Structures are given as structure tokens and as C-alpha cells.
Amino acid sequence: MKTIGLIGGMSWESSAVYYELINKKVKEELGGFHSAKSIMVSVDFAEIEILQRKDDWNGLTKYMIKSAKQLENAGADLILLCTNTMHLCSEEIIKNTTIPFLHIADATGKIIQSKGLRKLALLGTKFTMERDFYRTILKKYGIDVIIPDVDDRELIHKVIYEELVLGTIQSNSREAYKRIIKDLENKGAEGVILGCTEIPLLIKQEDVDIPIFNTTKIHAESAVEIALKN
């Protein structure tokens, strides 16, 4: 079994879900007393959030590279960045490390492609929804992305940063997200990518009529497949 390296803490609530999902998948695959071999570097999200607010992506990239190198030096065999937004730094992480990096959008794109879906709604932070780093990778899998209008993007972002990363789950926020997803479904979305690792804490499959793609679960389980491959 390969050792999975995790860059966590963004937020720690979703990183805890990664750890649980990875170990459950290993148990499911191998049975018995098996659990995952893993190493986690957990950052202080307060420091990350300040740099994000300042739009200091140079500083954020240096932070992510340092964390990735810590994992590499500790003996990890592959790297998972346990957040969608910070994949903006993925190219530089890959350039500055020698072990494989599993991109969350690649893992998600493969699953969506296997379902034969072509037009997907994308929910996440404003960084994820508005910049090209995510949709560029999804395009490789024949997937077109649609996003909410500007007011709804603001609402989604606000709920993530003011509620979900703090572990707060509000029913009115769930209803707002459900309304946004329905609007995107009416615009032709065949499914919805929960492109922030906190959103699955709020939205479940039973909340919406179209398939959801939980990027946290997809990413974690894809890592286990790689870790167990001979």
C-alpha cells in the first residue's frame, strides 16, 4: 500500500472527512484490520484566508509548495490537496515535487465522463467558479461548465467562508443552495459539481433532483485506488 500525503486544514472539518473516507475505502477494499497509510500536513486556515483576501497567490503558492515538500520529505508516495480552491497552485506544486499529485478536477472529470454527462453546474468559492483552472481540466473530459449569476456566486462564497468552514450548517443556506441548483438545472445542467470540499457538509443527493458530484468523496476514493494499485 502506498502512503497518501494530505495537505489539510482548509478547513479542518472537510479534512477530517477526507481522513474518514480514505480509511473507510481501504477497509471496504481490503477488509480485516486494514486502514490507510497516510501523512497529513494541516495548515492554519486563518493564515490562508488572509492571503486569499489579499489576492496574494504568490504567497499562497509558496505556502502550498512548502506543505507538499513536507509530505514528500516525510515519505508520502502521492499528494492530495484537500481543498478545491487551492488547486490554483497545483502547477507549481507539481513542478516543485517529485511524487505524483492527484488533481481533484481530474478525479472528478473521469467520474463525470464515465456517466456520459456533458453539461455540469459548478458550485464553489468565487475563485473556483470564476477562474479557469477548474473548467480547463474538465474540458479535457468533454465537460462544459455553467456557473450561477454574480449575486448567487456571492451568496455561495459567503456561506462557505462565514458558515461552512466554521462548521456551521444553516437550513436557510441549504434552501438557498437548492434554489441555485434548481435554477442551473433549468438552464440545462445535467448534474452539479460540489466544487468546494465544505459544500457536501450542506448539500446531499436527496436535496436536489440532478446527480451531485461530491469532489471530496471522489478525490479521497480515487487516492485509495492509486494507493492500492500494484
Image: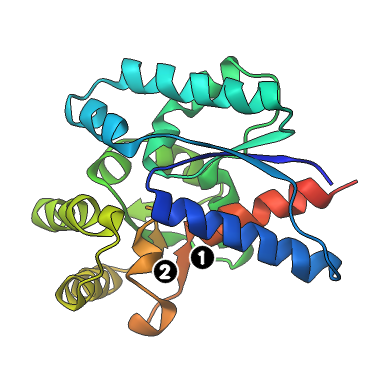
Rendered residue at 30%/72% (across/down): 185
Q: Residues within 10 Å of mark 2 (few under 14, many from 20)?
A: many
The reply to whether callout 1 and callout 2 are in contact (CB within 8 Å) is yes
Image mark for residue 117 = 1
Please indicate, yes or no, whether residue 12 appears anywhere in the rendered image. Answer: yes
Q: Residue at x 18, y 31 (%)?
A: 53
Q: Residue furthest left?
A: 151
Task: Judge by depth and name the residue closer to the eye, 105 or 43.
Answer: 43
In the picture shown, does residue 186 fall above or below 148?
below
Residue at x-position 45% and y-position 74%:
211
**Viewer-proximal residue, 109 or 178?**
178
Q: Residue 156 in the image: state x and y as whole percent.
A: 20, 57
Callout in the foreground (1, 2): 2
Residue closest to the eye, 175 or 63? 63
Q: Is residue 7 above or below residue 116?
A: above
Q: CA distance from mark 1 to mark 2?
A: 8 Å
Quickly name the residue at label 2: 191
* Percent position of residue 171, x then y: 20, 78
